[in-house]
Image (cartoon, coloured by chain):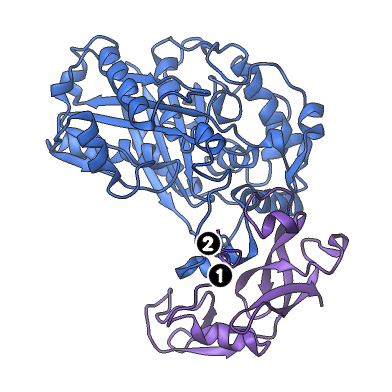
Amino acid sequence: MVGVAESDFGTVPDKTAFELQAQAATRAITDAGVVKDDIDGLFSCGHADGLHVLQLAEYLGLQPRFLDSTLVGGSSWETFVEHAVLALEAGRCSTALLVYASTAKSDVKRRYRSSDATFMPSGINQYEVPFGPTLISKYAMVAQRHMYQYGTTSEQLAAIAVATRKNASRNPNAVMRDPISVDDVMASRMVADPLHLLDCCLRTDGGGAIILTTAERARSLRKPPVWVIGAASAESHYSMAQMEDMTISPCARSGPKAFAEAGISHKDVDVLQIYDAFTIMVLLSLEGLGFCKPGEGGPFVEDGKLTWDGALPMNTDGGGLSSNHPGMRGLFLMIEAVRQLRRESTAQVPDAKVAVCNATGGFMSHCSTIVLARD
Amino acid sequence: MNEDWYLPQIDSESEPFWAAAREGRFLIMHCRACDAPYFYPRRYCPRCWSNETEWRDASSLGTVYTYSIVRQNPAPPFRDWCPYAVVLVDLEEGVRVMANWDRTLALDDLAVGAPVRITFETINDEISLPRVRPA
């Protein structure tokens, strides 16, 4: 991983999602020290209706020989890294561009889209859509079950939002920077019981891009390379009723595989980037990755160890809960992980050598775990 | 948006399920090859891919696996239903289904682990939707 960049983010009403992707891509090649004509692999999915990756390639003036547009939700970009490494090692491309943007916030204001992702009640959706399960309520059902089974409390979930806000307060680009308390989270309005407003990620505009290249080429570029030393994915379900045990994240399967490939154990991990669309997503990910035992996530997080200066620094840019969340956020986890390993973070973990990114897509449906390291 | 947009779009695979729903019966599927039930309806068993599968009447009795009370949904008609509860019920037969807590009942009686029964609310000539009530 040799180049990372965000586009403008937050509220960006004057730019299209295509433009934000072009902006992020140009910034990422500058960061990497490569040029546009080096790019022969393109990995993206998202905003464009139909044949997204063809529309995007055309907009960017690229005709890549390797394309991937796997769409599994927010974890798609971690999955792209897994696929890009395979393609680079197989010689199917030499410089891969991963890119994403959306104008999710401005589109709601413009009434181009609803504030909840709406699915039509056809096919397998006909057994759930008629009952009005919002995206937030799907994750709320996960939280409700975890609370029932293990006694997890709303205050413990709130501690996750409080820790990431503390991290965001050091990031000048984060959208929400004012410190919050557990009481603030508890006092925020209930959106879908038991999740409060501050248990939920932001909705912002914005995008990002990452450049990957071969190990050989990476050593000669501008910045110290960040190595992908482990990658694995796991799928679970689509319909909520098909998630067999709602307290177990798919990362309970992808995590151990990625750790084994990387040859690391938990004590080797200096910094974590965990997809945090909702606080409960973080809790299940920490348990699934084995940082604590199943059911013990509540007590594990309540002491505040997830702050940048804590025992297990997580989401040091502020995450989706406080920095930005333009629809699908997986790519941003890896941008911050690379910055940590290059000593460029605004909440730098001293001497960070190994970073783990774990992204969740869909409705706790899919996870990809990526292990990154510096020399 | 048409107010009926949220109603199930019946297809050849789901037609028997919604036909039974109109009669107030909850159907699940059973695989004769692996002798086990499953839901939602699919012609091929998702476990063993056998097409030796059949419809069976469920008891309509079960327990609440989990639920959420939705307090915000911009899409009609749900916008006007708020707060309403989305419930996942583990039926006695061993399958899990989603349905709404009967909106004529108080939300106070809804709890994880509570014994419940599935009934049907007639929406129109074609569609009756399952509702969850205390058993």
Q: Residue at x 31, y 35 (%)?
A: A81
Which of these two is toward me, B124 or A131? B124
Q: Is residue A170 above or below residue A317?
A: above
* Label at residue A239: 2
Tag 1 subunit: A
Q: Residue at x 27, y 48 (%)?
A: A51
The subunit carrying tag 2 is A
Q: Which corner quadrant of the image does residue A357 belong to?
A: top left
Q: As shown in the figure, which amino acid type bears the numbered disc 1?
A: Tyr
Q: Where in the figure is residue A24, as x and y percent of width and height?
A: 34, 22
Q: Which is in the foreground here, disc 2 or disc 1?
A: 1
Q: CA distance from mark 2 to mark 1?
A: 9 Å
Q: Determine the colour of chain A.
A: blue
| Circle 1 residue | A127
Q: Which residue: 15% across, 31% down?
A: A40
Decide if residue A159 is on the left or right side of residue A122. right
Identify which residue, A25 or A334, lies in the foreground: A25
- Secondary structure of the residue carrying numbered label 1: helix
Position in image of residue B13 (x %, y %): 44, 81
For disc 1, the neighbor class at 10 Å (few under 14, some 14 to 19, many from 20) is many
Left or right: A71 in relation to A302: left
The reply to whether residue A370 is visible in this rendering is: yes
Q: Is residue A139 above or below residue A217?
A: below
User: A330 or B30: which is nearer to us?
Assistant: A330
